[in-house]
Image (cartoon, helix red, strand yellow):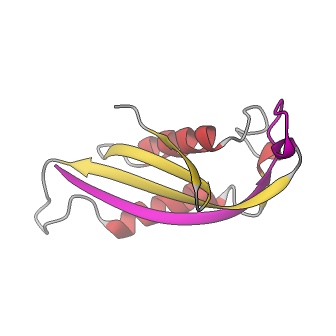
Amino acid sequence: MYRVSVRRHFDAAHALRGYQGRCENLHGHRWEVVVTVQSERLDEVGLACDFTVLKRELDAILERFDHRNLNETPPFDRLNPSSEHIAREVYRALQERLPGVAIYQVEAWESPDAWATYSEG
């Protein structure tokens, strides 16, 4: 099994609704998002997935969150903008943009030592 990963980032603010603590206040992060896809086969060039394509599609998804207040940005205007929800939303958006590509997992890092991972496997 081959696994290919790319890492991108965006800067955004959020506040966790219903949270008892400092994170209930509006604050910002430089979010790091790591996407891993997998394949049992390589294409005729020897690639499991083209890094350029994966980065381009991930950038298109993250662009709508960059330099925004996530609490005011769909779907997080209805859904609490936690790392867990961000990872799941990116995963699902990538599934739509890359049909036929097996997404293994998405990690959403809100700091260098705190992240959430979402997968459907």
Who's the residue at 73% across and 41% down the image? 74
Q: Nearer the viewer, residue 82 or 73?
A: 82
Image vertical order of residue 19 relative to residue 108, above or below: above
Who's the residue at 42% across and 37% down the image? 119
Classify residue 98 as left or right of residue 65: left
Image vertical order of residue 34 relative to residue 70, above or below: below
Residue 96 x, y percent position in the rendering: 45, 42
Residue 56 x, y percent position in the rendering: 46, 65
Q: Nearer the viewer, residue 115 or 44?
A: 115
Who's the residue at 56% across and 51% down the image? 108
Classify residue 34 as left or right of residue 74: left
Q: Nearer the viewer, residue 91 or 106?
A: 106
Quarter of the figure with the C terminus = top left
Q: Quadrant of residue 103?
A: top left
Find out whether residue 23 is within the magenta segment: yes
Residue 12 x, y percent position in the rendering: 74, 59
Q: Which residues are magenta?
A: 1-24
Classify residue 44 as left or right of residue 118: left
Q: How many marks?
A: 0
Residue 64 x, y percent position in the rendering: 68, 56
Q: Quadrant of residue 54?
A: bottom left
Find out whether residue 104 is within the magenta segment: no
